[in-house]
Image: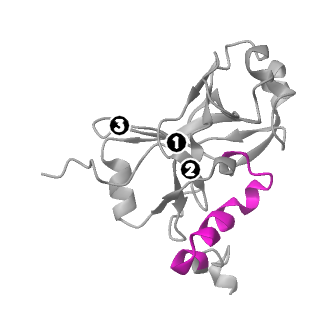
Amino acid sequence: MDDGADDGITVGSLLVATPQLEDPNFRRGVVLIVEHDHDGGTLGVVLNRPTEIPVDRVLPPWAGLVTGPPVVFQGGPVALDNALALARLPGDGEPLGWRALDGDAAVARVGLVDLDAPPGLLAAELLQLRVFAGYAGWSEGQLRAEVEDGSWYLVPAEAGDAFNADPGRLWQEVLRRQGGDLALVSTFPEDPTLN
C-alpha cells in the first residue's frame, strides 16, 4: 500500500491554487508548506493575502522589522487569532528565536520566528520578515487528495516568495516562472465569464 511518502509534498514547496479552486480562502492562493508529516498532516501559510491591519497594531515590537507592506497577512482560515511569522536570514547558523524550515534548499534560509522572543535577538540578522494571522491546515491524506483532484499545483518555492513586494501578483509570477502549461495558466482571467 502506498503510504504517501512519494507524494511530492515537502516542507518549503508551494501549493498554487488551480483556476478551478473556488474556495474563497484559497482562490488564486499561493501557500508555503511549513510543516508536513506523512502520518499526521500539513500546515502552510497563504502568502498572498495582505489585510489592512498594520503590524504595529497587533505586534508593535516587531513592526519596525517587517518587510513591506507593513500589514498582517491572512495566513489561512485556521486560528485567525494566532500570529506566526516567517523570516529570511543570511548565511549559516540558527539564532535564538528562529527555526529554519526543513526542506527545499531554495528556501533553506527561511524559517519560523518565535514572536514571544525579544525582537532584538533577531533584528541584526533579518533580511526579511512577514507576519501572518492564522494558517492553512490539512489532515493526513487530505492535501494529497486535493492535489490529485486538481485543486493545487505543487511547485518549488524561491526564498523571496514569502516576502514578495507585490503579493497581488504572486499567483501569476509563480506560475509564469514554471514555464510550459503552467505559464499559460498564469494568463487565466480573474473572471473567465468576462473573457
Which residue is at the far front?
92
Would you place residue 59 above or below residue 181 in this image?
above
**Crowding at mark 1 (Cα within 10 Å: few <14, some 14-19, many 20+):** many
Labels 1 & 2 near each other (Cβ < 8 A): yes
Which residue is at the far bottom?
195
The answer to which quarter of the image holds residue 63 is top right
Q: Report the Cα–Cα distance between label 1 and label 2.
A: 6 Å
The residue shown at (67%, 46%) is 162
Where residue 184 sits in the image (x, y, percent)? 59, 81
The residue shown at (81%, 30%) is 55
Circle 3 residue? 37
Circle 1 residue? 44
Residue 106 relative to residue 54: left or right: left
Q: Amino acid at mark 3?
A: Asp
Q: Report the Cα–Cα distance between label 3 and label 2.
A: 16 Å
Q: Amino acid at mark 2?
A: Val
Where residue 83 sits in the image (x, y, percent)? 65, 28
- What stretch of residues is rendered in magenta? 162-183
**Crowding at mark 2 (Cα within 10 Å: few <14, some 14-19, many 20+):** many
Residue 143 relative to residue 23: left or right: left
Q: Report the Cα–Cα distance between label 1 and label 3.
A: 12 Å
N-terminal label among 1 and 3: 3
Query: Could you tell me what secondary structure mostly forms the magenta stretch?
Result: helix
Residue 155 seen in the current view: yes
Q: How many marks?
A: 3
Nearer to the camera, 92 or 163: 92
Q: Is residue 171 magenta?
A: yes
Where residue 45 sits in the image (x, y, percent)? 58, 42
Which residue is at the far left?
1
